[in-house]
Image (cartoon, helix red, strand yellow):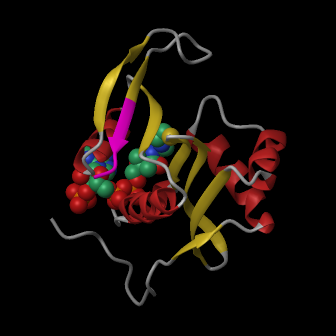
C-alpha cells in the first residue's frame, strides 16, 4: 500500500540530533509514553558518544526520531517515535533503515529492544521491517507490563 503523503511537502530527510531538538523529543516522549525518558537522561544520551539519535524534522521541529546506544555486539534501542499527525508516512521505516546503516558502520551486528506486550502497532511495524520477537521478560516495565524482546540481526 502506498504511504500517505502531505501535499506540497518536501522529502523527509533523516538527520542527526542537534541539541536544540531535545525539547521537542522530550515533548514527544511525554505525548506517547507512560514512562517517558527524563530530560536529564535525554541529555546524558545526547552527550554520549555511545548513543545515536536520528531525527526527521518538519518546519524545524522533530516529528519522528529513533535513538539507540551501542552495547557491542548490539545496538540497544532507546526509543522510536513518530508524532501522531505524521504516522503511516514511512517515517519509522526510513529512520530504522538509516539507523541500521549507521549501526552496522559502527560495528554493531544487531538491534535489540523491548516493546510493551500491548504495543501491537510497534510490534506490527517491526515485524513489517523483518524484526523478530526473541522472547518475553515479565514485569520489565515500571508498571509491571511484560516486554517482548525484539531483535533485528543484520544480514
Ligand atoms: C510505531 C511507530 C513508531 C510507527 O511509526 P510510523 O512512522 O507511523 O511507521 P511507518 O509509516 O514507517 O510504518 C512502517 C510499517 O509499519 C507497519 N505499521 C505502522 N503503523 C501501523 C499500524 N497502526 N497498524 C499496523 N501496522 C502498522 C506497516 O507495515 C507500515 O508499513 P506500510 O505503511 O507500508 O504498510 C508509531 O506508531 C509510534 O510512534 N508509536 C508510538 C510510540 C511507540 O510506541 N514506539 C515504540 C516503542 S519505542
What span is colored magenta in the figure?
150-155
Asked if residue 124 is among those painted magenta in the image, a careful observer would answer no
| Residue positioned 37% across, 32% down in the render | 150
Work out whether 62 lies above or below 27: below
- Number of marks: 0
> Residue 28's x, y, as percent?
63, 50
In the rendered image, the vertical position of residue 50 relative to residue 53, given as above or below: above
Residue 147 on image: x %, y %? 44, 21
* Residue 42 shown left or right of residue 7 in the figure: right
Horizontal relation, residue 100 to residue 57: left or right:
left
Q: Position of residue 127 (x, y in %)?
A: 25, 42
Q: Which residue does the image show at 58% across and 62% down from the upper left?
A: 54
Q: Quadrant of the N terminus?
A: bottom left
Q: Given the current orientation, which residue lies at the most extreme right position?
A: 40
Q: Is residue 58 above or below residue 69?
A: below
Please tell me which residue lies in front, 69 or 64. Answer: 69
Residue 109 vs 2, above or below: the answer is above
| Rendered image quadrant of residue 91 | bottom left
Who's the residue at 62% across and 57% down the image? 53
List the single residue furthest toward the bottom. Answer: 8
Left or right of 132? Residue 113 is right
Query: Residue 26, position in %: x, y?
Result: 72, 49
Q: Residue at x 66, y 70 (%)?
A: 61
Residue 87: name its quadrant: bottom left
Snapshot quadrant of residue 76: top right
Q: Main secondary structure of the magenta part?
A: strand
Amino acid at each position: 500500500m502506498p504511504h500517505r503523503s502531505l501535499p506540497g511537502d518536501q522529502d523527509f530527510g533523516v538527520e542527526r540530533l542537534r541539541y536544540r531538538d531535545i525539547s521537542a523529543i522530550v515533548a514527544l516522549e511525554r505525548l506517547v509514553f507512560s514512562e517517558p525518558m527524563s530530560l536529564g537522561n535525554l541529555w546524558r544520551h545526547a552527550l554520549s558518544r555511545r548513543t545515536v539519535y536520528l531525527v526527521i524534522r518538519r518546519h524545524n521541529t522533530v516529528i519522528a526520531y529513533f535513538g539507540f546506544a551501542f552495547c557491542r555486539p548490539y545496538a540497544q534501542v532507546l526509543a522510536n517515535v513518530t508524532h501522531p499527525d505524521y504516522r503511516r508516512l514511512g517515517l519509522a521505516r526510513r529512520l530504522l533503515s538509516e539507523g541500521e546503516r549507521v549501526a552496522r558502520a559502527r560495528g554493531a551486528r544487531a538491534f535489540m529492544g523491548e516493546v510493551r506486550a500491548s504495543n501491537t502497532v510497534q510490534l506490527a511495524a517491526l515485524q513489517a521491517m523483518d524484526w523478530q520477537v526473541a522472547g518475553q521478560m515479565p514485569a520489565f516495565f515500571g508498571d509491571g507490563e511484560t516486554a517482548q524482546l525484539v531483535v533485528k540481526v543484520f544480514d
